[in-house]
Image (cartoon, rainbow, N blue to C red):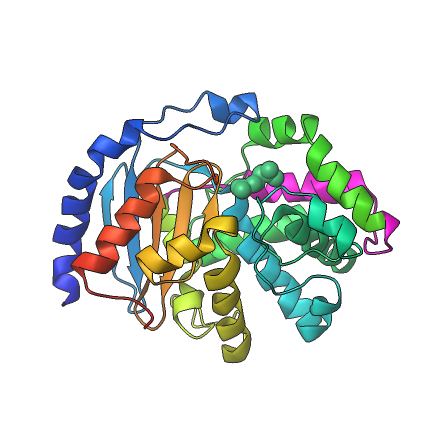
Amino acid sequence: MPTSDYQRVLNEITQEVKPLLTQGKVADYIPALAEVSPEQFSIAIYTTEGEIFCAGDCEQRFTIQSVSKVMTLTLALQRYGDELWNRVGKEPSGTAFNSLTQLEFEKGIPRNPFINAGAIVTCDALYSRLSAPMHSMLETFRDLSGNRSIVIDKQVANSEYEFRHRNAAMAHLMKSFGNFENEVDDVLWSYFNFCAIELNCIELAKAYNFLANKGIDYSSNKRVLSSRQNKQLNSLLFTSGLYDAAGDFGYRVGMPGKSGVSGTILAVLPNRFTVAVYSPGLNSFGNSVAGIAALELLSKKLDISIF
Ligand code: GLN
């Protein structure tokens, strides 16, 4: 299907998911997210030719939450290469994003970089190599999305930090096994600030366009990851990006993806586009109900998948 049909398809999807907007439950583990209205929806495509298509509340920004873990991994791979895999695994977890149990059995090495423990240890590795991690991360999103006005929602970051006990428990457990280099609270503060970066769907799809473009950012023509690392990262997204629901997402959508508890999902169609969707109502796995449905409809209507 030519890209000229993308806009029509996104408009159709926006109408078709409307009945689902009341079905999920917004994240309530921190007050700042519990206050969000569930009936929001937006979806944006950024193609490898730099074309943008969007439907729904295209201007609406939201905190990207766990979708930030993809950039954390990207920045860590740039600095460590394969050495990073001594600290974090590559296998699907089969457990919830914030589960602690496997850490005990697997001697403080998290299963993959997208569950919280894995993202926090990746953040720790990054923290050791960056003098100002929050500034570097924000600048990376500003550069790649082409928007200097991007900021961190400090209310969300503070609230996450205040209620950090579960994530702190993971970090301390990893530290007890010798898999943590810095002060737990310092690393967690960076991690929560990364999660609290605010983007809209267009900015999110654009920031991650390199994932669909063999590791090269379209606008600046700069290499973000080597082509091999880009393949590896997309493969890990396919197997672990939606936690213990990665199998169902892969089955329904057929693309690598990453979800966040704010209700956003980013998906990648290599050599064609990145797509970002936002709708805050979540299912029991912490993934957006309307977001998954929208991406399933997109893959069906455009007859696309990585296979
Ligand atoms: N900030 C969230 C947390 O650490 C991110 C989790 C998510 O988006 N799945 O709990």
Task: Say which quadrant the C terminus sits in.
Answer: bottom left
Whether 182 is among the magenta residues is yes
Residue drawn where x is 27% and y is 36% of the image:
57
Location of residue 99 (image quadrant): top right
Residue 215 x/y as whole percent: 47, 72
Res 255 → quadrant:
bottom left
Is residue 131 visible in the rendered image? The answer is: no
Q: Residue at x 63, y 53 (%)?
A: 136
- In terms of depth relative to the viewer, which is nearer, 193 or 247? 247
In which quadrant of the rendered view does residue 37 lie?
top left
Q: Position of residue 148 (x, y in %)?
A: 47, 47
The quarter of the rendering in which ligand 1 is drawn is top right
Q: Position of residue 265 (x, y in %)?
A: 40, 48
- Decide if residue 294 is on the left or right side of residue 145: left
Quadrant where the N terminus lies?
Answer: bottom left
Q: Is residue 188 left or right of residue 221?
A: right
Count every numbered label the image shows and give the total: 0
Answer whether residue 199 is magenta in the image: yes
Residue 254 higher or lower than 293, as above or below: below
**Magenta residues, start to end:** 176-200
Q: Residue at x 41, y 43 (%)?
A: 264
Residue drawn at (78%, 49%) of the image: 104
Relative to residue 22, is residue 242 drawn left or right? Answer: right
53 horizontally vs 96: left or right: left
| Residue 258 at least partly seen | yes
Against 194, is 145 above or below? below
Q: Residue 209: horizontal and vertical position, in percent?
A: 40, 63
